[in-house]
Image (cartoon, helix red, strand yellow):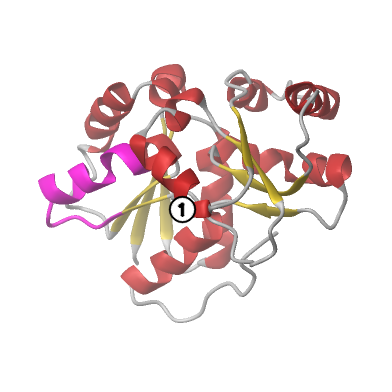
Amino acid sequence: MLKIVIFDSGYGGEFFADRLKAELPIVEIIRVIDWRNAEKILSSPRDARNIARDSLRPYIGKVDLIIFANYLLTITSLKYFKRKYKNQKFLGLELKAPDTFVKKDILILTTKAVSKTMSYHNFIFHLKRNTKTITPDSWPAKIDDGELTKEEIATTIKKSLIKTDFHPGEIILACSQFDDIKTDLKEIFGQSLKIYDGFDDALRKTHKILNIRGGIGKKTK
């Protein structure tokens, strides 16, 4: 049986592992969730890389694929892991650009650490859209603890948009824990809101890397 390791620091990894298990019930999924170092992994690229390396050492070279369910780790360290461990296949959640030509304002929810990277700035530049980035760094921990409410989500976003001529038509999620608030976001902005994240692309690439037929059909949720 094919073995896939999912690495993350919180429920984002659990959410992605659940999606992967539903999509590929024929594989064995090993969840390596480092809750203890969650804050370091979400805030520091160097710490995220070192912690991931230590946590994954027992699996490198022994499983079919390792997936980083963490955007910061993906955009800052995925290439490093691929170069260092050439006999191990790696994949990560990547920043997802909208696949529509409609020029709507794009709201991006991520963490400060991600927003400070050169990869993120290049991503924003290539969107060529009117964008607004919000970095509610307290949300991942609250999601892990089951404490983030729809009221707080709405208040935080609306406060950030006060006195701006910005009207979100699409939202990009660049923190895996935020997969948990998609329903809330649609209730706040309307059911027609398009939400993008890296989950579906990672699932498709998993099929391709492991040469497994089939795959999900929808690109957005």
Q: Is residue 209 left or right of residue 205?
A: left
Q: Is residue 30 left or right of residue 200?
A: left
Tell me residue 145's x, y (percent): 66, 21
Q: Main secondary structure of the magenta part?
A: helix
| 41 is within the stretch colored magenta | no
Between 104 and 115, the one lying in front of the other is 104
Seen at 20% across and 53% down, the residue is 62
Between 129 and 107, the one lying in front of the other is 129
Q: Secondary structure at mark 1?
A: helix
Seen at 24% across and 45% down, the residue is 59
Tell me residue 115's x, y (percent): 47, 31
Tell me residue 53's x, y (percent): 23, 33
Seen at 27% across and 39% down, the residue is 77
Quarter of the figure with residue 87: bottom left
Tell me residue 50's x, y (percent): 24, 26
Q: Is residue 190 above or below residue 211?
A: above
Residue under numbered circle 1: 126
Seen at 57% across and 21% down, the residue is 137
Is residue 7 visible from the viewing direction of this image?
A: no
Q: Please state the extent of the stretch shown in magenta in the rendering.
A: 74-90
| 82 is within the stretch colored magenta | yes
Neighbourhood count class around disc 1 (C-alpha, 10 Å): few under 14, some 14–19, many 20 upward: few
Q: Is residue 192 above or below residue 58?
A: below
- In the rendered picture of this protein, how many numbered marks are placed on residues? 1
Is residue 62 visible from the viewing direction of this image?
A: yes
Quick one: quadrant of the N terminus?
bottom left
Q: Is residue 100 left or right of residue 67?
A: right
Which amino acid type is marked by label 1? Answer: His
Between 58 and 65, the one lying in front of the other is 65
Q: Is residue 219 left or right of residue 50?
A: right
Quick one: quadrant of the C terminus?
bottom right
